[in-house]
């Protein structure tokens, strides 16, 4: 394993631990507890330091913070590796804008489907069973 791949593996392990509610066993045990999956309070701020993580990991944080549901179509889109980093803590709205930028960079779009939104490739034909205008 190269030094870079070891660093990525360690970062991924820490992220998985944080999202599963387990505390990191890394040297820095002073990290805050995992955030519960609930809509963000108006004054809540988020640390954004996601380096080469599955898109589903970042999307889960956005889903929880915004109280919205997302579905990847095809499901393998969630496996795409992405990076999103912010130099300062961001609000829920700023988190959404950053995430939308990641989606656009990956050639993905959102398609509103009533109670949820599809994340799909931009070149995929929109579904005709629901209006993409968000009716």
Image (cartoon, rainbow, N blue to C red):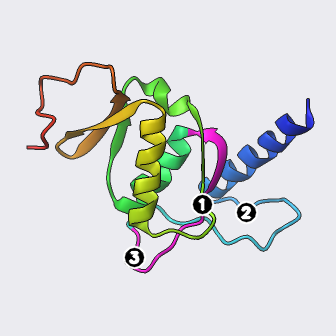
The quadrant where residue 119 appears:
top left
- Look at mark 2 in the image and give the residue it sits on: 23
Which mark, by number, is residue 7? none
The quadrant where residue 47 appears:
bottom right
Residue 100 appears left or right of 11:
left
**Earlier sequence position, callout 2 versus callout 3:** 2
Labels 2, 3: front one? 3
Task: Determine whether label 2 and label 3 are within 8 Å by CB.
Answer: no
Label 3: which secondary element: loop
Position above or below: 135 against 33: above
- Look at mark 3 in the image and give the residue it sits on: 41
Which segment is the magenta one? 40-54
Towards the viewer: 57 or 82: 82
Q: Position of residue 25 (x, y in %)?
A: 83, 59
Position above or below: 29 against 129: below
Label 1: which secondary element: loop
Q: Position of residue 130 (x, y in %)?
A: 12, 31
Q: Position of residue 87 (x, y in %)?
A: 63, 65
Alpha carbon distance from label 1 to label 3? 20 Å
Alpha carbon distance from label 2 to label 3? 23 Å
In percent of the image, x 22 and y 24: which residue is there?
126
Labels 1, 3: front one? 1
Towards the viewer: 41 or 110: 110
Which mark, by number, is residue 86? 1
In percent of the image, x 41 and y 70: which residue is there?
40
Quadrant where the C terminus sits is top left
Residue 74 covered by magenta stretch: no
Alpha carbon distance from label 2 to label 1? 23 Å
> Which residue is most to the left?
135
Position above or below: 117 against 108: below
């Amino acid at each position: 394993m190269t030094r870079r791949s070891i660093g990525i593996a360690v970062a991924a392990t820490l992220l998985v631990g944080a999202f599963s509610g387990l505390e990191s066993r890394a040297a820095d045990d002073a990290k805050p507890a995992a955030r519960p999956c609930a809509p963000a309070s108006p004054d809540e701020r988020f640390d954004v330091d996601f380096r080469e993580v599955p898109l589903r990991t970042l999307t889960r944080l956005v889903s929880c913070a915004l109280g919205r549901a997302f579905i990847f179509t095809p499901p393998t889109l969630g496996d795409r590796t992405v990076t999103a980093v912010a130099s300062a803590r961001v609000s829920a709205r700023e988190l959404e804008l950053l995430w939308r930028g990641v989606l656009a960079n990956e050639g993905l779009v959102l398609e509103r489907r009533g109670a949820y939104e599809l994340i799909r490739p931009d070149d995929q034909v929109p579904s005709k069973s629901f209006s993409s205008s968000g009716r």
